[in-house]
Image: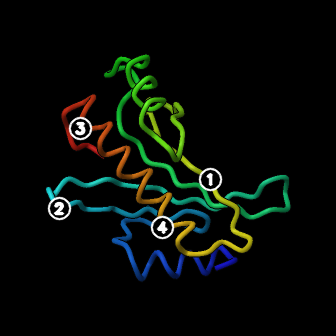
Amino acid sequence: MATWDDLVAYVRQTYDVIREEDDEIRVRLTYEDQRTQDVVIVHEILDRKEDWVQIATPFARVDEVDLHAVLTEIGNTLVVGGAVVMGDYLVLRHSLPLLNLDINEFIDPLELVTGSAEMLEEQFTGRDDY
């Protein structure tokens, strides 16, 4: 899988797509306990020449959690992804180069990022909003 179009075709076939635009596709993952996590998969161009894909999923509003506690938990437990503030939301995200991307190099980070965000959302908000 080496192009954005190839990745989008795979995502459409494999996941529950809830929204799609030119350089963005959103999917909803549903877990065994019926909790869900929405994830945004975005096509990015690095330095105007390299194609990358970014996986991002919100898990809390910044003003509703103890930011220090959240970042400490992320630092102690996460292997893939990092936390960022995007507007009013805390988001876990991870980026990958598309060139020579093998499907497992996408699936594993997607599942790790979304699963981690789901765990953080439940732990720090007690809800299932995202």
Q: Are marks 3 and 4 in contact (CB under 8 Å)?
A: no
Does label 4 or label 1 sit earlier along the sequence?
1
> Vertically, is 34 above or below 121?
below
> Vertically, is 5 above or below 51?
below
- Amino acid type at mark 3: Glu
Give the residue pinned by disc 4: 107
Q: Residue 42 sits in which quadrant?
A: bottom right
Q: Nearer the viewer, residue 86 or 105?
A: 105
Give the residue pinned by disc 1: 95
Q: Nearer the viewer, residue 120 or 65?
A: 120
The residue lying at 22 percent from left, 43 percent from top is 128
Q: Residue 30 sits in which quadrant?
A: bottom left
How is the structure coloured here?
rainbow
Q: Quadrant of the N terminus?
A: bottom right
Distance of label 1 from label 3 (alpha carbons): 24 Å
Distance of label 2 from label 4 (alpha carbons): 18 Å
Residue 73 in percent (x, y) is at: 39, 28
Does label 3 or label 4 sit earlier along the sequence?
4
Distance of label 3 from label 2 (alpha carbons): 14 Å
Dot label at residue 32: 2
Q: Are marks 3 and 2 in contact (CB under 8 Å)?
A: no
Distance of label 3 from label 4 (alpha carbons): 22 Å
Secondary element at image label 1:
strand
Secondary element at image label 3:
helix
